[in-house]
Amino acid sequence: MNWIAYLFSGILFGFADWYFVQALQERRQLLSESLPFAAAFLSVVNFLVWILPLLPVTFDTARRYKRCWPSGGAASLVWAAAMLSYYGWGAYLMASGKLPGWGHLNMHLSSSSEYQGKVWPTVIAVMGGEFKEWIAFAIISGFFTGIILCATFRLERQGQAS
């Protein structure tokens, strides 16, 4: 049952991160002109936010299991589900002509079906290509991040018990 909850938390995080990244991009463009270090800081924040959905998952699995392998598996599941929903939502928005910055593609087409027929190869190339790259990263690095968070949690707990 917990693994289903981890799956759904990853899916929800992927949707939330889509809009978080969009808001971050707007701020980055505004700040990059006047404060170059602010744009770099926002890039770091963009990556660090991905730790947030792993904290409750890895701590939960660290309490339930004797080894840290399940925490690694749970973290991989969360990040993989987040990637699936993030790029799935992006593909939907792009295919429907609602992706910010891509609406110009449907200006000269007579119907939405004509738009979808012409843009679908682009959707597959852009979103599918990025998804393939990031899903491998999510599974592998999610596993190791989950193990590291589990070990950190256990060390902290042992320090409090002493």
Image (cartoon, rainbow, N blue to C red):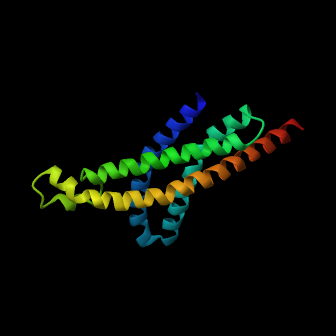
22 over 73 or under it: above or below: below
Specify the farthest residue to the top: 1
Figure quadrant of residue 63: top right
Numbered label tally: 0
In this view of the protein, which residue sits in the foreground, 145 or 158?
145
Answer left or right for 75 relative to 157: left
- For image coordinates 26% across by 60% down, the residue present is 102
Pick the quarter of the image with the C terminus: top right
60 over 106 or under it: above or below: above
Residue 72, percent from left and from top: 66, 45
Residue 129, percent from left and from top: 42, 61
Residue 159, percent from left and from top: 85, 42
- For image coordinates 58% across by 34% down, the residue present is 3
Residue 140, percent from left and from top: 61, 54
Answer left or right for 83 relative to 125: right
Figure quadrant of residue 94: bottom left
- For image coordinates 58% across by 27% down, the residue present is 1
Answer left or right for 65 relative to 133: right
Specify the farthest residue to the right: 162
Answer left or right for 42 relative to 150: left
- For image coordinates 84% across by 40% down, the residue present is 158
